[in-house]
Amino acid sequence: MSIEQTTPTNIEIDVKQSQVRISWQDGVQTDYPFTDLRKVCPCAECEAFRKNDDPLRVIQSEQVVTEGVLQPYNPAQVVGNYAIQFFWADGHSAGIYSFKFLREISGQ
């Protein structure tokens, strides 16, 4: 994947449409529904939950919230020059979504 494919030129958080819209340096624009982003959270706890064979899961299935609702007062922040961190209304904010990861899950 090229640097142009993983470098955003604009990031919009559209609360009304419940999505994040990223324009990439190579001209592609991708829309990410909040719910989809919450379901693929790349943090260690969420990764462990998604691996059913992991005997050391820290969280139980009833603890996992997959509805994507961002905190209204602090929905997200850019992390360095490589990622974005979302602050979900369920209190979860451990996932750091790298721009490379976001582009990979876009399928574009």
Image (cartoon, rainbow, N blue to C red):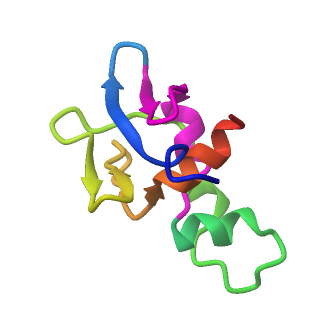
Question: Against 104, is 51 above or below?
Answer: below
Start-end of magenta stretch: 18-42
Residue at x 59%, y 36% (from the top left corner): 36
Query: Would residue 76 be found to the left or right of residue 21 on screen?
Result: left
Q: Position of residue 13 (x, y in %)?
A: 33, 28
Q: Which is nearer the eye, 11 or 89?
A: 11
In the displayed structure, 10 sits above or below 74; it is: above
- How many numbered dots are placed on residues in this image? 0
Residue 46 is a magenta residue: no
Residue 38 image position (x, y, % from top left)? 52, 44
Of the pair 8 and 21, the residue shown nearer to us: 8
Residue 65 in sight in this render: no
- Using residue 102 as the reference point, say whether residue 78 is left or right of it: left
**Front in this rendered view, residue 72 or 10:** 10
x then y, percent, for residue 11:
34, 33
Report the residue that reaches farthest toward the bottom: 56
Outermost residue to the left: 73
| Residue shown at the point (61%, 50%) measured from the top left | 40
Give above or below for 5 relative to 13.
below
Side of 42 relative to 50 (left or right): left
**Quadrant of residue 10 within the rendered picture:** top left
22 in magenta: yes
Residue at 64% of width from left, 54% of height from top? 1
